[in-house]
Image (cartoon, rainbow, N blue to C red):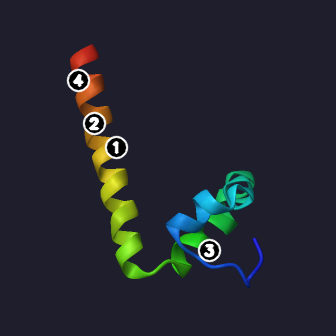
């Protein structure tokens, strides 16, 4: 990920190499990408993560 690239969620779809970079080093590159996002997109990611955790909790609760 170079500093000249745009930072947005849509850009991850347009440039899959950024996803590869984030997956290779999530501690550094993932956090840096998240911090560069506009606050509205940060809210979208947090909502999606929360929804995923709730869904996982329901799945595990039904299974056990």
Q: Which mark is residue 55?
A: 2
- Give me the C-alpha separation between circle 1 and circle 2: 5 Å
Is 28 situated above or below 6?
above
Residue 64 appears in the figure: no
Residue at 70 percent of width and 79 percent of height: 5
Residue at 30 percent of width and 59 percent of height: 47
Counting other residues with Cα less than 10 Å from the Cα at mark 3, is it few (<14), some (14-19), or many (20 or more)? few
Quarter of the image where the C terminus is located: top left
- Circle 4/circle 1 CB separation < 8 Å: no
Q: Which numbered disc, 4 or 1, marks the residue closer to the eye? A: 1
Residue 61 appears in the figure: yes
- Circle 1/circle 2 CB separation < 8 Å: yes
Picture quarter containing residue 16?
bottom right
Residue at 28 percent of width and 36 percent of height: 55
- Dot 1 corresponds to which residue? 52
Q: Secondary structure at mark 2?
A: helix
Residue extending farthest front: 14
Pick the residue in front: 55 or 28: 55
Q: Which numbered disc flags the more N-terminal residue, 3 or 2?
A: 3
- Dot 3 corresponds to which residue? 32
Q: Which numbered disc flags the more N-terminal residue, 1 or 3?
A: 3
Q: Which numbered disc, 3 or 4, marks the residue closer to the eye? A: 3
- Dot 4 corresponds to which residue? 61
Is 64 situated above or below 18?
above
Q: Position of residue 36 (x, y in %)?
A: 55, 80
- Give me the C-alpha separation between circle 2 and circle 4: 10 Å
Pick the residue in front: 16 or 48: 16
Q: Secondary structure at mark 4?
A: helix
Q: Which numbered disc flags the more N-terminal residue, 3 or 4?
A: 3
């Amino acid at each position: 990920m170079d500093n000249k690239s745009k930072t947005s969620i849509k850009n991850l779809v347009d440039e899959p190499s950024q996803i590869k970079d984030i997956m290779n080093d999530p501690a550094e590159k993932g956090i840096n990408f998240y911090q560069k996002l506009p606050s509205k997109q940060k809210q979208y990611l947090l909502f999606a993560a929360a929804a995923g955790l709730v869904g996982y909790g329901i799945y595990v609760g039904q299974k056990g």
